[in-house]
Amino acid sequence: MPNKLLSLARPEIVAMSAYRSARSEKVQGNIWLDANENPWDHSPYNRYPEPQPYLLAFYLSQLYDVKSNQLLITRGSDEGIDLLVRLFCAAGKDQIMICPPTYGMYRVAATIQGASVVEVPLLKEQNFSLNLPKILESWEPNVKLVFLCSPNNPTGNLLSTSDILSLCKKMDGKSIVVVDEAYIEFSSNDSLAKYLKDYSNLVVLRTLSKAYGLAGIRCGVTIANENIIELLKKIIAPYPIPKPIIKIALEFLNSDVFKNQIKIIQQERSRLFNFLSELSFVKKIWESESNFLIFEASDSRIVLEACLKKGIVLRDRSSEYNLSNCIRVTIGSPTENTLLMEALRDV
Ligand SMILES: *Cc1c(COP(=O)(O)O)cnc(C)c1O
């Protein structure tokens, strides 16, 4: 099993030994003369942080119900996306597959790495579900990564678990299937991380940026087979998670305000959905399992401008594949949503 995974990664990365920073291993001691740091602790930050902060990794492994060696803490899950592309795709040779309309960073990361992109659109008429037969048909041996986003940004829907698992099975030894679960906490589904033991080519991305309200600290988690995590550790920047960030993450992870906030977001999502459905200029609105809604307006520009006049900023998605005249709106606080409704009533 590990060999199949290793043969998918770039051979030069598999062959290289990781840069060993001074603190890569747990070393016992109390006089630290190994990392050229300033010896005076006039601030709490004169020492380098742990390359992967042990305590934070422990808490995150509990939160996501995986083993500590199956996760990598990164600077946002955006860094996880970037590292995966760099690990598996040789420039000018390998490809990723995406299912538009979807999150933009998969393409950005691929372009930076010199990997090209195979597109298999989601089925708009079937609530943006995966086109599994077309994915299998379009697959080529140099497609190393298939990026799926569930719930999908910007369409808000969950992808079918059985579709994803059947894809993992079919892609065994051929491609890595990455499931980006940035919004899973707002949905009615559990994380797919529990299937890690059955599918070694499954990778799950989680983040503290959305449901946990910590977008400002840039903290994401890549969850994968331990062999993949080991390889990712070779290419991540040294000491990537700053000490203040570790402290803040630990502080807020122990709080449970988020659970209630998620409930409010879900209620507000229904309230806004019902309101939008009644508006004459809303041509179509899709059910959402995330903290945003997407709708198609008769003329998206008029709606965006009217909201902006009231200081309300929405996300224009009209230039995305299959989303002409579509606007994405994040579910705000109840007060913010009411103000949005007033602005929309006046359009
Ligand atoms: C917001 C978002 C991310 C980025 O998360 P960070 O952890 O803040 O980098 C990843 N994937 C999707 C689909 C997102 O919408």
Image (cartoon, grey):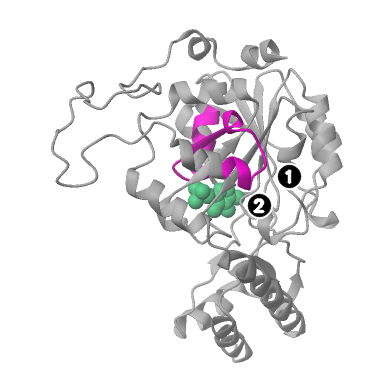
Of helix, strand and loop, which one carries label 1?
loop
Q: Are marks 1 and 2 in contact (CB under 8 Å)?
A: yes
Residue 238 located left or right of residue 6: left
Q: Which type of secondary structure does the marked residue at label 2 adopt?
A: loop
Numbered range of the magenta stretch: 60-85
The residue type indicated by label 2 comes to Tyr
The residue to which callout 2 is attached is 321
Asked which quadrant contains residue 222, the reply is: top right
Quadrant for the N terminus, please: top right
Tell me if residue 332 comes above or below residue 40 in the rendering: below
Question: In the depicted view, which residue is nearer to us: 60 or 211?
Answer: 60
Q: Residue at x 73, y 59 (%)?
A: 187
Which secondary structure type mostly characterizes the magenta part of the structure? helix
The residue located at (40%, 21%) in the rendering is 25
Residue at numbered disc 1: 121
The stretch drawn in magenta includes residue 149: no
Query: Residue 243: x, y in percent?
Result: 33, 44
Q: Is residue 199 above or below residue 147?
A: above
Instruction: Give the amino acid type for the residue marked by disc 1 in the picture.
Output: Pro
Q: Is residue 80 magenta?
A: yes
Q: Is residue 267 visible?
A: yes
Check the image and report above or below for 292 versus 275.
above
Give the crowd class for mark 1: few <14, some 14-19, many >=20 residues within 10 Å: some
